[in-house]
Image (spheres, grey):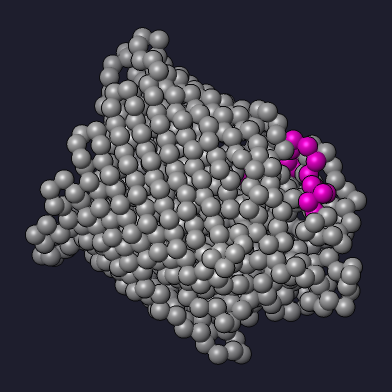
Amino acid sequence: MHKKLILLAASDSIAISVQAEEQAITELEPVIVTSPLQLKLSESAMPVTVLSDDELRMKTGHSIGETLKNELGINSQSFGPGVGTPVIRGQAGPRVRVLNNGIGSNDASAISPDHATSIEPLLAERIEVLRGPATLLYGSGAMGGVVNVIDNRIPGKAFDKALNAALEQRFDSTSDETSTAMKVEGSKDHIAYHVDGFYRHRNNLDIGGRGIDTAKVAITDPSLEVVDNPYGYLNNTGAEAISGSAGLSWIDDFGFAGVSYNNINNNYGIAPDGTGEETVRIAMRQSKYDFKSELNNPFKFAKSIKTRLGYTDYEHTEIANGEPGAYFTNQTYEGRMEFEHHDIGPLRGVVGFQAQASDFNAIEKLSGEIIVPRSDITSYGVFGVESFDIGPVTYQFGIRVEQTDIRPDGMNSLSYTPVSASASALWKLDNRNSLNLAITRSSRAPNVQELLSNGYHDATRSFEIGSLSLKEETSYNLDLGYRFKSDWLRAEFDLFHNWATDYIAQQRSGEFVDEDGSNACAPDCTIPVVVSTQNDAIFKGYEAKLIFPMMENHYGLLELTLFSDYTRGEFVNGGDVPRMPPLRYGFQLDYNKNKLSSYLRLTRADDQPHAGDFETSTAGYFLLNVGVNYQVKLYKESNLMLFAKGNNLLDENIRNSTSYLRNFAPEAGRGAEVGFRVSY
């Protein structure tokens, strides 16, 4: 949702540095790579967020969710500092598809909130967030949207020289975290290569107050006896992660074809419940093999054919008090082919096919007790998106039909046929004003955890019960937007209303059991029962941004941004959808001069009293962040970027309403982050 103007790459964060001569530099408007027709930002009829270059470097957090959490309409569903998955307009998990270079991450992050995504923002070169017709290309049921993290692991074009390199080093005071990321890439003749890697280590997280809100815990977990509640830090929140990737491509006039390999190991802790009885860490490992190709004008009717193939081998073990507990595995093959045809009259479009096959299993490692039966999951989908112009209006239509089959061991197969469709229109009233309208029908099959889970889950400290009676979830979304651009003001407004039928929610039932699922321990049982339920729901809200240039002269460029977003989720038969984000509003000041860029951002998040059944409300807070970066020209073609950030400068004890662990794990307290990036 960013518009690129002279001297400014993005208003909601650090702007690009201006050349020392202070000449006006016109930056080309970014093209949305994830969009089926690779539209420019101004040509999109739906809200789009694009982070890249210095802006991305300044916003990069410990997870994808944390990197995006200050963008309008986006929050992070934290589960302590080790996990941060994106929440888009109140939707998370399977309703937000997280992609890596256009293909699914295929980890277990969409299954449960304690599972970290395997995609690392430190290595990203670009992150795009889409909603609307384009999401149909990547899966049904992406009711929230699609997040595509692009890292150029398989180069798609030749580089300007044989060797390009970058090294980035960061330090974060809130957890004494050090992180190092590097990449080396280049090309010669028809061969292009890419190598990258990162290492991260952190200790326990500093917070602004007590870790456990004992008053709220007494409401949700009345039998829980809190005996350890440290002040100013969270126990068991350290982490260590390491990853490496290598990719190779053949590039020619016909296009390109390439392969890559990635391995990541991540070991992180879950904030304890204060009883001193159980400490849980998660040891995650993933290997990923990918193939990617693109053929230009392969035959008469085709403008291009894009192919993606991937195999992911994922597993993680939840280690409770040093002993292996819940053990999740997911081996997934995913392939997709997109065929972009030459224009047929006014029609520009893409049609394609996608297939996915997974072998999923979740057991208690020592006892062999089944949490989710081993299941073969297959999904096949065909999709198409077409666009055309009539006068000043650009129309886009999309449809996707999918067949999903789940075959659990020892049980009858389950079959679903989700059908999704969308239509949008962008009306450019004049050079300053535009309106956009989109209507989307999104349908998804329930996932294996929602259907089949039946056991104690160490990390969530809950007994999870699925339901075989779940039906397909379908949502109908109406999105209306307005854009205004002039020399004295830029404005963006988006309103949305979503009617969801048979909305699936994993909610507390109000019951408590022991680890075997028995309530014979009553009234001293401490493990809450979480069940999969299905009800009609309504989601509505808005995102708004106003940008005022305050000063533009030889002293530099100063801009003021006013922003706000809001999401409300309610069940039609009464009650609140749990874990909804609060109303947010605030302002940001951006100052840029020559090679210096800086910002100051104050966000007010209101109370969230609409917590849902058997959940507790969260208090409002003020979040004050500042940041600065400075560009230095080094020897010949090498450059140095120095940056520093101050986060949560008011040291607020922030309880994240979208987090399952909000009463046990507040967000990070006051801290400073410093770093540098050297590129050649």
Q: Is residue 369 visible?
A: yes
The residue lying at 44 percent from left, 53 percent from top is: 147
Is 31 situated above or below 468? above
The residue lying at 78 percent from left, 76 percent from top is: 517
The residue lying at 17 percent from left, 62 percent from top is: 341
Extreme-top residue of the structure: 554
Q: Give the range drawn in magenta.
A: 198-217
Is 418 situated above or below 230? below
Q: Is residue 563 left or right of residue 668?
A: left
- Looking at the rendered image, the quarter that the C terminus falls into is top left
State the image quarter where residue 673 is shown: top right
Front in this rendered view, residue 555 or 474:
474
The residue lying at 85 percent from left, 46 percent from top is: 229
Name the spot of residue 247 as percent of width and height, x first: 41, 53
Q: Residue 672 lies in magenta, yes or no?
A: no
Is 312 situated above or below 83? below
Name the spot of residue 226 as percent of width and height, x first: 88, 53
Name the spot of residue 345 as percent of width and height, x first: 8, 59
Front in this rendered view, residue 451 or 29:
451
Front in this rendered view, residue 357 or 32:
32
Name the spot of residue 198 as percent of width and height, x first: 56, 45
Q: In this view, does 310 lie to the left or right of 86?
A: left
Front in this rendered view, residue 472 or 292:
472
